[in-house]
Every structure is written in structure tokens, then in C-alpha cells.
Amino acid sequence: MTEYRRAHVPGASWFFTVNLAERKGNDLLVRHIDDLRRAFRYVRENHPFRLEAVVVLPDHLHCAWTLPPGDSDFSMRWNLLKGYFSRAIEKGERVSQSRQKRRERGLWQRRFWEHLLTDQADFNQHIDYIHWNPVKHGRVRQVADWPHSSFHEYVVRGVYPENWCSEGGFDVRAGE
């Protein structure tokens, strides 16, 4: 089995991109948003982390987490989260031969992309990227119009105005 090089920094904050295996035309994540929320809740209850920001699009999601002091195991959390979600929904997706041999479902890409958030500026830039992502992908014209985003909580907390980035483009060097 391949050993991936990942940074292991206990208590750190991380940005993640997680994709479905079949992205084109797939709306699974928003169609089963309640199952995905339950998966996040289950993992957070059993293996705590602070969910700093999240956006769920039909075929992928972005989020930022902060792990507890002394803990660096985000991979285990993603494994549990993907597994919980996969068991919660009906089978029916295409499953490759290699996945069949391993008795895997065909919902998620096996891996995910992570980025260690190194300082406050990096953290802020990635939080902005998370919230801007539905506009970037042409799902909505304004950030506030996408329902599956922590942006709305950030507005309530006074971090963003309701019309954040509604007047023009957004250029951020973060993300996928």
C-alpha cells in the first residue's frame, strides 16, 4: 500500500478538498445533505475537531478544521466520515473492479487534498475561498445565495456582510 507523505501537526488547522469519485453531473452531496450532516456530527462527537468553515457543493466539498491539542489524525476522521455517509445512502453507483476487489463503494475519491494552514492570513484566505466556491463554480451569483455553506453563520457572527463579494470578482490563491 502506498504511504502518502502528509504533515502530522497536532492541534493544527487544515483546509481540505474532498471529491466524489464520479463528479460530472453528480448531485449526491446536496441531495443527501442531511446524511452528510449526520456523518460530520457522528465523527465530531466521537473524534472531536472544530469545524471552522464548510461548503458543500453537489460533487465535492471544502472545509477547514482545527484538531485538538495532541491530535493530528485527520485521515482517520475522513475515513470515518466517508464511511458513515456511504453506509447511510442506497447503493447504486458504478463500482470499478479494483474497488469491488477491496469491497469498497464507488462514492468517494479514495484520497483527499489537505493543506496545513500556516498563519492567520493563510487561514483567512482559505475561509474566503471556501465561501466563494459556489460562485466560482457558477452555482450562484452571490455567496449568500448558496444554502450549504457556513457563510451564513459567519454573517450572523459579523465576520462578513450579507452582500460580501456581491459587487465583483474575487481573487484568492487557495483551494484545490
Image: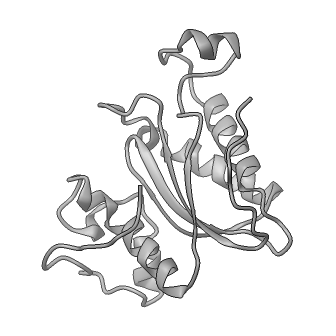
124 is higher (above) or lower (below) than 70: below
Q: Nearer the viewer, residue 46 or 97?
A: 97
Q: Nearer the viewer, residue 156 or 25?
A: 25
At x 59%, y 34%, the residue is 110
Q: Quadrant of residue 59?
A: top left
**Quadrant, the N terminus:** top right
Residue at the outermost bottom position: 158
Q: Nearer the viewer, residue 55 or 74?
A: 74
Residue at the outermost left position: 167
Q: Position of residue 62 (x, y in %)?
A: 47, 57
Judged left or right of residue 99, residue 29 is left
Residue at the outermost right position: 70
**Quadrant, the C terminus:** bottom left
At x 70%, y 16%, the residue is 102
Judged left or right of residue 101, residue 96 is left
Q: Quadrant of residue 114?
A: bottom right
Q: Position of residue 91 (x, y in %)?
A: 56, 18
At x 53%, y 34%, the residue is 109
At x 45%, y 72%, the residue is 126
Total numbered badges shown on the rendered structure: 0
Q: Position of residue 90 (x, y in %)?
A: 56, 22
* Colour scheme shown: one colour
Q: Position of residue 83 (x, y in %)?
A: 68, 35
